Amino acid sequence: MTMTDPSPVISAKGLDLTFQTKDSPVQALRDVNLDIGAGDFVSFIGPSGCGKTTFLRTIAALEQPTGGTITVNGMSPEAARKARAYGYVFQAAGLYPWRTIAGNISLPLEIMGFSKAERAERVEKTLALVDLEGFGGKYPWQLSGGMQQRASIARALAFDADILLMDEPFGALDEIVRDHLNEELLKLWARTGKTIGFVTHSIPEAVYLSTHIVVMSPRPGRITDVIKSPLPRERPLDIRDTPEFLEIAHRVREGLRAGHAYD
């Protein structure tokens, strides 16, 4: 399934991925076709084990497809990685406890060879983007889980890639913190205009955040629906109580049910 952007930044055509195991091959993705346009916020939702994270990892060249093609900015995922085309946020914050928050954010910049002055400037900028000004000198254990995850997002933003890939970054947080970070992520997206790929198990989260919602079936992962959201890009949290929001959520549920019909 495709979106309407004439020059997609991410494009998968007939994508298959099969893992070889000791027992038997496991097909994680089957015939995935998807185009993602510049500046879109695309959420991937489906049951556990449906290939959401596998697809995100394929975009990031962390997994290799066994069939079909995938391009990022017109390049192979490997070339896009070398071109620093994307940042990646994992499920866990993954911050080094012996480095300050600023030190953690600066780490990929150090690896990439940025000067000390430029690292400091970018760290300060990204701390402001995620509302962590004044916390650069703290250590991860001195911050709440939500703040640690914001620091992880800042680390992915530090080298200013146009694409941000997020693998269920708020799944381990309580609902109140999750709602707050959803609001903050929308503000961040509005400020930066980045293209975001976001994995979630939460229907309300997917509907609240996204311009497009990609519904996936149980393994082998297939796309059962791509829902283009009619909601405005500026979304207060209470939009979740509106008929428009509930209608989209209903369609997502129907898509998930349809996916099970393939089994």
Image (cartoon, rainbow, N blue to C red):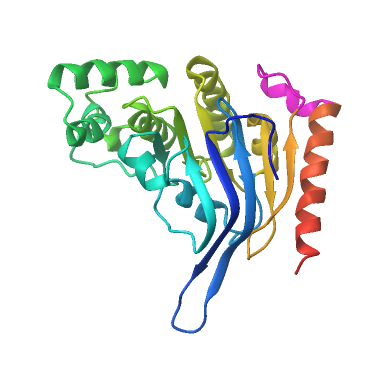
Q: Quadrant of residue 132?
A: top left
Q: Which residue is drawn at 31% across and 27% down?
A: 159
Q: In this view, does 181 lie to the left or right of 147?
A: right
Query: Residue 27, how many percent across, how many down?
Result: 57, 69
Of residues 237 and 159, which is closer to you in this image? 159
The magenta span reads: 230-242
Q: Residue furthest left?
A: 116
Of residues 68 and 189, which is closer to you in this image? 68
Q: Which residue is drawn at 43% across and 58% down?
A: 64
Q: In the rendered image, which quarter contains the N terminus?
A: top right
Of residues 249 and 171, which is closer to you in this image? 249
Of residues 61 and 171, which is closer to you in this image? 61
Query: Residue 36, how many percent across, how many down?
Result: 59, 36
Q: Tell me, yes or no, if residue 1 can be seen here.
A: yes
Q: In the rendered image, which quarter contains the C terminus?
A: bottom right
Q: Main secondary structure of the magenta part?
A: loop
Query: Residue 35, how many percent across, how many down?
Result: 61, 39
